[in-house]
Image (tube, rainbow, N blue to C red):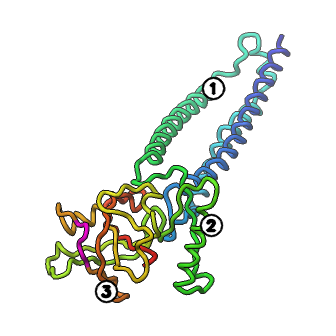
Amino acid sequence: RYAVGATRRAVMSLQFVRARALSIAGGVLGGFIAQWGSQRLVHLAHMDQGGTFIYHPYGRTLTVHWIAALFIGLLVGLFPAWQAARIDLSAGLKEGAGTHSGSPSQALSRRSLAVLQIALSLVLTMAAGMFAEALHKLVSAPVGFNPQHLTVFSVDAKLAHSTVEDSEALWSRIAQRLTGTPGAQAVTYGTGGPFPQGKDVAVVIPGSVSVTKHQSGIRSIIGPHYFSTLGIPIIEGREFDERDRRNTPDVIVINQTMARKLFGAENPIGKTVTMFNGIDPDWIATIVGVIADHHQSWLRRTASLVYTPAQQ
């Protein structure tokens, strides 16, 4: 009976060590999954000026993560193994007739370690639930356009040292080719993609010297049917189409924020404004449309936006 009791404790110790080894392996696998998942999450929220998602790994954060995972794995894995190695077989044989659970100090340490693991698991489970809820709210938050079944990619025509005319021809060829692609409902192009990342431009009502009649905004150059393709609602007027081309009067489309700051409650459709960016000569354009506000980024929504047609 004594031999059976000692053997049973040895088997239980080996099983405990094996369980801790599996815990360490799970922690290492979880680290790889966490690193992969962090890249996917960052891709949801970070875009460069060209509208391309980018990811920069944070070396310090990953280093701290691996050190913490290694330390915790060694703590919960080696401590029970160290205790199992210190078992006195002769003392275990003597105490085997009364109990098979080891000395009181060993039983207390095992119970304390189990309580600590349960407490940490509970905290991590609660944090994971809160994170999942926050992620769901972030992904499901309305951004002002329809992201469903929307494919965005960037092409830099300047890399081929092309002229402005060559770039315009390139955009037109790409749009024509993609329009004939099976399953494509609409195709358009523009600077910055769904999140405007253009350069600042000032919009002034001619003949006005009041500060309230001057407003700077972010200018984006877009192709025909841009707003209907992205699902951005048009509040007043129209969007750009084939009638807006070279050698026709310049037109622009602004968003609600720009319209409110420039004209208040007055309808801006048909109004003539002067625009300048400090580089190109000033030009006069007519407002032909007002679109609903949509996010300039995942957090910023109330930016003043100005759109000009690429064909002009």
Q: Based on the picture, tell me whether residue 298 belongs to the magenta stretch.
A: no
Q: Position of residue 50 (x, y in %)?
A: 51, 70
Q: Position of residue 158 (x, y in %)?
A: 57, 82
For badge 3, the amino acid type reads Asp
Q: Residue at x 64, y 52 (%)?
A: 36
Q: Position of residue 214 (x, y in %)?
A: 22, 76
Tell which circle, 3 or 1, labels the residue nearer the N-terminal end. Answer: 1
Q: Is residue 199 visible?
A: yes
Q: Which residues are drawn in magenta?
A: 268-273
Query: Disc 1 on helix, strand or loop?
Result: helix
Kindly give the residue lying farthest to the front in the view shown: 243
Q: Is residue 288 above or below residue 35?
A: below
Task: Tell whether label 1 touches label 2 (CB within 8 Å).
Answer: no
Tell which circle, 2 or 3, labels the residue nearer the N-terminal end. Answer: 2
Quadrant containing the C terminus in the rendered view: bottom left
Q: Could you say which disc has been placed on residue 282 in the image? A: 3
- Residue underneath mark 1: 105
Tell which circle, 2 or 1, labels the residue nearer the N-terminal end. Answer: 1
- Residue underneath mark 2: 177
Q: Position of residue 205 (x, y in %)?
A: 21, 77
- For discs 2 and 3, the disc positioned in front in the rendered view: 2
- For discs 3 and 1, the disc positioned in front in the rendered view: 3
For badge 1, the amino acid type reads Ser
